[in-house]
Image (cartoon, grey):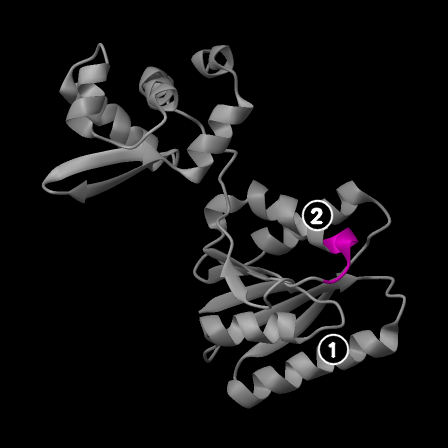
Amino acid sequence: MRTYISTLGFHETRVTRPVIKHGIDDGDRVVLVRPANDGNSERAADAVGYVEDMIAEIEPDATVTTEQVDTSGFMATTLQCSDLLTAVDQDRDLVVNFGGGAREVLLPLLIATVLHAPIVDQAFQYTDVDQEVETVPIPNLTTQIPSSAVDTFELLVHLDREMALPELATESDKSKSTVSRHVESLAEAGVFETWLEDNAKYVSLSQTGVLIARACPSEDLTAL
């Protein structure tokens, strides 16, 4: 089962289209996140009602609820969004949809989603330019790079390209078995991506790895 957590302004299709595209089944939940002090309650009620009717038509046994968050302070809103994400049962897939709406809710939800990236199964965005549903990759910026593998991480950052594992080991001053263990632990941490091609294992930086490399100077990584 899934729980969709979605911001909602006055354009209900920003919620319904991502849900329809990803799928809605018996027992799924759609949680609409809105400001507690809405300046146009009639339009908001119309948008919520449309989502409820659409979901009920597609899957009568799915539920739609509305969570109103206090937008009087940025940190308070972010913490409330964090609570919404962590309250989802661990046996459910957690899908976050950035469907527009008030910026006072959208940005805190984005920050909370990055904070809790390990528990978020998928994220979507309904684009303004071409009005398409796009998958949003959420980086896990809270991951910890294993201290024993920092050198291998820094080496691939320096080389700045994908490469086969034997080539990475050649570039390193460590044994192939040691580099292989490092690659495995770095992949588990989410900063490396690995795949098999022509009977060889290839390695590259993941999105999370690229962002961490840009954010953390080499001396900071070494201190881990």
Secondary structure category for the residue under label 1? helix
Above or below 102: residue 131? below
| Disc 1 and disc 2 in contact, CB within 8 angstroms | no
- Left or right for 213, reference 104: left
Give the x, y percent position of residue 178: 19, 19
Q: Alpha-carbon neighbours of circle 1 within 10 Å: few (<14), some, or many (≥20)?
A: some
Q: Quadrant of the C terminus?
A: top left
Which residue is at the front of the view, 174 or 82? 174
- Left or right for 186, reference 217: left
Secondary structure category for the residue under label 2? helix
Give the x, y percent position of residue 52: 65, 82
Measure how far apart labels 1 and 2 are at the Cα level. 21 Å
Which residue carries the number 1 mark? 47
Identify the residue at the far right of this view: 39
Residue 121 badge: none
Q: Residue visible at 59% across and 54% down?
A: 85
The picture quadrant where one finds residue 164 is top left
Above or below 219: residue 66? below
Which residue carries the number 2 mark? 108
Q: What's drawn in magenta, residue-wise? A: 101-105
Disc 1 residue type? Ala
- Left or right for 177, reference 207: left
Whether residue 143 appears in this view of the structure is no
Give the x, y percent position of residue 100: 69, 62
Disc 2 residue type? Pro
Total tally of numbered discs in the picture: 2
Give the x, y percent position of residue 96: 56, 59
Q: Quadrant of the N terminus?
A: bottom left
